[in-house]
Image: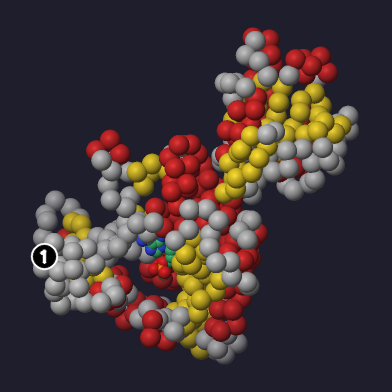
Amino acid sequence: MTEPAKAKVDMEKLVSLCRRRGFIFPSSEIYGGLSSCWDYGPLGVELKRNIKDAWWRAMVQQRDDMVGLDSSILMHPQTWEASGHVQGFSDPLVECKECHRRWRSDELEGDKCPECGGELTEPRLFNLMFKTFMGPVEDEASVVYLRPETAQGMFVNFENVLNTTRKRLPFGIAQIGKSFRNEVTTGNFIFRSREFEQMEIEFFVKPGTDQQWFDYWVEERINWYAGLGIKRENLKLRPHEKEELAHYARACSDINYLFPMGWAELEGIANRGDFDLVQHASSSGKGLSYYDEEAKEHIVPYIIEPSAGVDRTFLALLCDAYDEDEAEGEKRVLLHLHPDLAPLKAAVLPLSRKEHLASFAKDIYADLRRHWMVGYDDAQSIGRRYRRQDEIGTPFCVTVDFESLEDKQVTIRERDSLRQIRVPIEGLEATLRAKLGGEDLFVLPEGGRVWKE
Ligand code: GAP
């Protein structure tokens, strides 16, 4: 993959678009916001759901070697002892003796405070897990943690899944859910936040086949991003050096994306070996193994873990989709979002608000809404309305004009090419379905014609 030097959009533009169009707001904004927490607005929540649905469909529903899970966020505290998180999930922190700001010592250049040049304390380890209390008594015995990864829910359910699904190796468990980390250095919008969502797979394989499955998953996951429209030149694989491997990992590669602030991790793919099952078996006293019928012996599977972030995928998709060009003599901002991901699949735009045309257009809107998330916009000029839809990535606009009342036809305008066709309303749903599925706009349905090249 060749490396472009710089992302084509800066973060400010993305933040501003997200704010302006209701994709993402700062959390609890009326109180001044809460650091590194974000709320997904009406369009953001649709895009986010579409990302998760696309992942779930491809990784779970379309495979016969994967099952889903939705484990609870709060888990038995022993989980985090066995996983190594209580001991080892920490960042080394230093504090400035002058201004008292805290810094991650592994990210600092030099030995002075970057803010004021003051002297720094010795590094101290700071655990990233959020602690809370379960039940009415707030004491050490009732401490529980907000999970910092969804992975552990899948390890502790290994036996439940095995017994109830009768899956044979190799097979995987997948889940999507919230995770929490009391990150020291946050920022870059939703790239690193304290509450975020993960889409994780724990794929159980026979020891000895782990390298082959690791390679398989690296390729599979890169293809997944590319299939959703992310340009391959903006994706880069970064294998970890031995010294930087997490305590559980035998090998790890990050899929990096060229974000506005530079190349950074979008997803991590780790070969966790048998670390997790061995740890949980010894901590719980349960034999977390698998009976290999060929070898006639119990084995502990190795685990390959493709671990993706929903929020980072959201950000990468926005960066990749963002574009500015000129249409009908005007500058426009547009998102080239894949139709599967676009918050709205189409928008119905009546040329006028006049009652008979509006009610006609609303019937079309009501009909399409039974199939997809569709918008309706009758405010301002048609040009302005097209711009508004382009800016939120709506692939098609359906324009209803006075002629539509007579000929029972509407025009469909394609976001990226600006081409238009005129098609019978009767077959509108089928036509849109074909176009959303990737059929060229100029492949016309019966009775359809080219409207604008
Ligand atoms: N179970 C392995 C694991 O959690 P990780 O590399 O720490 O590995 C996996 O996290 C993915 O989760 C990252 O590649 C990233 O996409 C996402 N992620 C991790 N921390 C995040 C944070 N603070 N904010 C947003 N996304 C985060």
Q: What crowding class fits label 1: few (fewer than 14 Cα within 10 Å), some (14-19), or many (20 or more)? A: few
Residue at the (15%, 77%) spot, across then down: 122
> Picture quarter containing residue 390?
top right
Question: Which colour scheme appears in the figure?
Answer: secondary structure
Question: Does residue 128 appear in this view?
Answer: yes
Q: How many marks?
A: 1
Residue at the (62%, 14%) spot, across then down: 353
The image shows residue 98 at horizontal and vertical percentages of: 11, 65
Vertical comparison of 70 with 44: above or below:
below
Vertical comparison of 236 with 16: above or below:
below
Q: Looking at this view, name the residue that lies furthest to the top.
A: 355
Q: Relative to the observer, which residue lies in front, 410 or 278?
A: 410
Q: Relative to the observer, which residue lies in front, 449 or 198?
A: 449
> Picture quarter containing residue 399?
top right
Residue at the (56%, 39%) spot, across then down: 392
Vertical comparison of 95 with 137: above or below:
below
Query: Residue beneath label 1, please?
Result: 98
The image shows residue 235 at horizontal and vertical percentages of: 57, 67
The image shows residue 416 at horizontal and vertical percentages of: 69, 43
Viewport quadrant of the C terminus: top right
Q: Quadrant of ligand 1?
A: bottom left
Kind of residue at disc 1: Glu
The image shows residue 237 at horizontal and vertical percentages of: 55, 74
Viewport quadrant of the N terminus: bottom right
